Amino acid sequence: MQDSLGQNQFFWNGDGWFRDLLNPSTEIGARFADALLRNLAFSLVALLIEIPLGIAIALCLPRRGWTIGPLLVIIALPMLIPWNVVGTIWQIFSRADIGLFGAALTGLGLPYNVTQEPISAWSTIVVIDVWHWTPLVILLVYAGLRAIPDAYYQAARIDAASRWATFVKIELPKLQKVLVIAVLLRFMETFMIYTEPFVVTGGGPGSATTFLSIDLVKIALGQVDLGSAAAMSLVYNLITLTLCWIFFTIMTQLDRRRYA
Amino acid sequence: MGADIVSDAGLAEVRGRSRPVAAGSLSGALPKLGFAVYLLALMLPIYWLVNMSLRSNEDITSRLAFWPHHPSLEKYFFILGDPTWTHAFLVSLTYVAINTVISVTVALPAAYAFNRYHFIGDKYLFFWLLSLLMAPAAVYAMPFFNLYYAIGLFDTVWAVALAHCLFNVPVAVWILEGFVAGVPREIDEIAAIDGYSFPRFFIRIFLPLIANGVGVTAFFCFMFSWVEQLLATTLTATDALPFAAVMTRSYSVAGMDWSLLAAAGVLTMIPGAVVIWFVRNHIAKGFALGRV
């Protein structure tokens, strides 16, 4: 709510920063609204891919046998790579001239170019996130599946329930707790995503991958517009908090209704 | 009767093992194909990382090579032969191990309490834990720095281990609570009737029942602490410099050393792979109840 004019002199700006930020007709407001929408779309797409894919892969994993160990190790590998290395791998991997991913897509005749094409850049960030974090969902769901007592499956078999019915009536309700955690963790991380776009695309081309956190750093450190940046981080944090609270409440309400 | 729970659980496990078709997993050609495609897609970037680590920098940036034409382990020998790197590797392992032990031990009773007891504001307190994850780590870096500097913890493995509890404890509590909820309350009651003291019940009966959850939680704590860089780098200077901090050096000195970074990346995957190998049986352990 204050701004600095240098030499540690601050002036009082009331709610000015907030009014500008939340008003899409101002420059900063339009920028914020854009970044917010872009980020929400990104989080939504990432969640819609990662959660169903994670459940499906967890269901495909064998329940016992010697293959479990090696398979779990392979699946967990992407998560164990530090953030900066993930960015570096993909920086090379997605280049059309020296990277396999980029070369393969260009070879298929797609106009793929991370530094030029907004759609390529945006979808590359989604692919990276899916590659990096679907394993988290898989491991959580797999452990959750294994925690379902055998008696439930025996009951399903006695009732001659179909595979789909077993999934919807037994597995999904029992996985609910684990899924709440998976959804919340993934939502928070995709909503605050920074390193991947920063390293791979730098927020560009144009502003195609300028997500909220990237925009925030640009405003705060790039333009040294501390007042706007501070207002933006507060609003950003409140949005994250509210959305998580909504997810949490909806998912726990469903639970309560089921056992009521 | 309490002992029966345990022995019956064992019996059910044996019965389960003799069943030819595993219940609860997908079988058939299409899921198998999809699974194989996913594994392939997952492995490709990792293969590329290994590929990069065996090639020279000029080779990486000049052409597309599906396999290293002149493979060399030079970068690996460089890392393993340099005391800065090996020391940093051990430092990282130490604080991650300390953090995992603290997080899981603290989170177990907390998760049990959140699920089994009701108190004023329990739902809000539970949610508040998660809100600690909603701010970027950078927000906490300065307060931690000041605090640790004042009490002399700065640049020690404990500084990083304790700072990482900030996000690992909430994650652990949340995951474990889900698994605690899966255990019927009747188990607690039966054990109490059978004369189990609470600590004995918790360790002998309850913990084995949520082994999947503990396995997954331990791995996640390890993983999140292992890949976290910002706090680890800010809170250390020389004695407890983490692996990640040494890794970022490969950017600045004479341009980007892609090959060295790739080799370091390959090496960082090994400890986590070992951890998940050790907890694999816990994660995949079937839940089997005797009489309820």
Image (cartoon, rainbow, N blue to C red):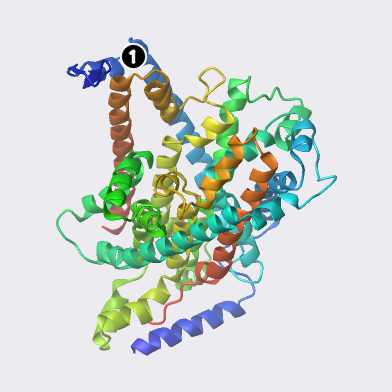
Helix, strand or loop status at disc 1: loop
Please give left or right for residue B273 compared with residue B175 in the image: right
Residue placed most toward the observer, B152 or B244: B152
Using the image, determine if residue B292 lies above or below residue B57: below
Q: Chain of mark 1?
A: A
Q: Position of residue B158 (x, y in %)?
A: 38, 59
Please give left or right for residue B260 compared with residue A239 in the image: right
Residue underneath mark 1: A24
Residue placed most toward the observer, B221 or B7: B221
Using the image, determine if residue B15 lies above or below residue B221: below
> Callout 1: 10 Å neighbours few (<14), some, many (20+)?
some
Which of the 4 image quadrants contains residue B208? Answer: bottom left
Q: Position of residue A210 (x, y in %)?
A: 48, 24
Mark 1: amino acid: Pro
- Which residue lies most toward the right here? B69
Q: Position of residue B14 (x, y in %)?
A: 55, 82
Q: Position of residue A202 (x, y in %)?
A: 54, 26
Residue placed most toward the observer, B139 or A51: B139
